[in-house]
Image (spheres, grey):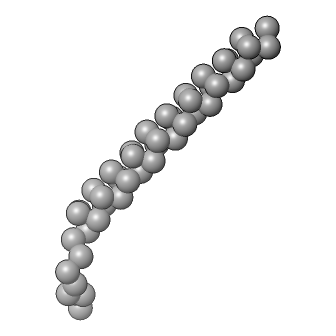
Amino acid sequence: MLEESNVSIIESMMSMLAAQRAYEADAKGVQAADEMLRIANNLQRG
């Protein structure tokens, strides 16, 4: 029997992929900011 629901699998997958890409972009931004702060901290000490 087919389950009748209002959920579109394709739309769900697309929104999940978009959320994953947004998370990856945010993580890279945080990583870059952390690296810049580390470099600035090392310059200040040196």
> Is 8 placed above or below 39 here?
below
Q: Nearer the viewer, residue 19 or 1?
A: 19
**In the current view of this chain or complex, which residue is farthest to the right?**
45
> Is 28 placed above or below 20 here?
above
Q: Is residue 27 left or right of residue 22?
A: right
Res 9 quadrant in image: bottom left
Residue under the image location 20 percent in, 80 percent down: 6
**In the current view of this chain or complex, which residue is farthest to the bottom?**
1
Could you say where residue 8 lies in the image, as x and y percent from the top left? 21, 71
Q: Nearer the viewer, residue 17 or 38?
A: 38
**In the current view of this chain or complex, which residue is farthest to the top?**
46
Q: Is residue 23 left or right of residue 32?
A: left
> Is 4 placed above or below 39 here?
below
How many numbered callouts?
A: 0
Residue under the image location 52 percent in, 41 percent down: 27
Q: Is residue 39 left or right of residue 14?
A: right
Could you say where residue 23 lies in the image, as x and y percent from the top left? 45, 47
Could you say where residue 22 lies in the image, as x and y percent from the top left? 39, 46
Res 36 quadrant in image: top right
Q: Indicate the quadrant containing the C terminus: top left, top right, bottom left or bottom right.
A: top right
Q: Is residue 24 left or right of residue 38?
A: left
Q: Indicate the quadrant containing the N terminus: top left, top right, bottom left or bottom right.
A: bottom left
Res 10 quadrant in image: bottom left
Residue under the image location 29 percent in, 65 percent down: 12
